[in-house]
Amino acid sequence: AQKITQTQPGMFVQEKEAVTLDCTYDTSDPSYGLFWYKQPSSGEMIFLIYQGSYDQQNATEGRYSLNFQKARKSANLVISASQLGDSAMYFCAMREGNDKLIFGTGTRLQVFP
Amino acid sequence: KAGVTQTPRYLIKTRGQQVTLSCSPISGHRSVSWYQQTPGQGLQFLFEYFSETQRNKGNFPGRFSGRQFSNSRSEMNVSTLELGDSALYLCASSFDPGLRTDTQYFGPGTRLTVL
């Protein structure tokens, strides 16, 4: 079974609008971490935001916020005020305990003027 | 602080050859992980090293091997290259994978093409 599911292969958003990228996960471990990475066409994976399973509040980092719904096992990334430079692949990832990092299949985001 | 560096950035090899990729982690980081990324299989975990010991290993054949040195730099080796080994190989470093909040930071990758 997929541990990390990203159901949106591609998303379009207009510049300055907000966009939500979906991520659901599956784990029975009470201790886990959720991560979002951005991968531009250059290939480098850029860390965006982290949410721990015990964190009471949703994580935020600048224009990025994580809509963490633990009961639904979802960790959606919200990008506010999209910019052209946000066009990239976005990956959701999870680490159970101190095990390896597992990635979803990614969502390609395209921002248009 | 310098980021994760990987060398070489691009590599072209022929089937049957072997290749060694290098990764230098962020200063102070003691863990290095390796991933293979292909259009068909996505991001797949290869192995993780911490303080010169392999902590985790993915489901790859024995042709794929790695090691970590005392300065935390890591190398991965692929022997008897196959066409299917063509991929972007990403290295990531982190401080301590035993910490729940430990975050991996990635290098720019090595793009390997096998002809």
Image: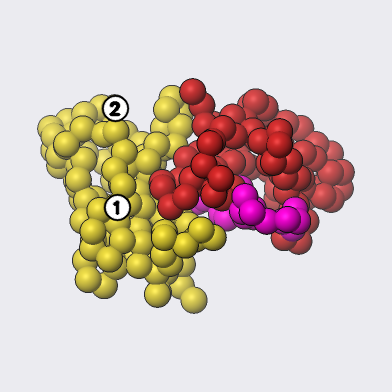
What amino acid is found at the position of numbered circle 1 in the picture? Arg
What amino acid is found at the position of numbered circle 2 in the picture? Gly
Q: Are marks 2 and 1 on the same chain?
A: yes
Hue used for the chain lettered A: red
Query: How far across and how far down the image is residue B87, in percent?
Result: 36, 36
Numbered badge on residue B27: none
Query: How far across and how far down the image is residue A35, in percent?
Result: 58, 49
A111 and A21: which is toward the camera:
A21
Who's the residue at 57% across and 55% down the image?
Answer: A47
| Residue on which the image places disc 2 | B84
The stretch in magenta equals A36-60
Judge whether residue B98 is colored magenta.
no
Quadrant of image for the C terminus of chain B: top left
User: Please, is residue A92 above or below residue B71 in the view?
Assistant: above
On screen, residue A42 versus residue A54, left or right, reads left
Location of residue B95 (image quadrant): bottom left
User: Please, is residue B4 above or below residue A93 in the view?
Assistant: below
Numbered badge on residue B55: 1
Of all chains in the rendering, the one displayed in yellow is B
On screen, residue B49 versus residue B62, left or right, reads right
Q: What is the secondary structure assignment of the residue under circle 2?
A: helix
Residue A54 visible in the picture: yes
User: Please, is residue A25 above or below residue B72 in the view?
Assistant: above
Who's the residue at 19% across and 45% down the image?
Answer: B65
On screen, residue A3 versus residue B18, left or right, reads right
B43 and A85: which is toward the camera:
B43
Location of residue A24 (image quadrant): top right
Q: Distance from label 2 to label 1 (Cα)? A: 26 Å
Judge whether residue A40 is colored magenta.
yes
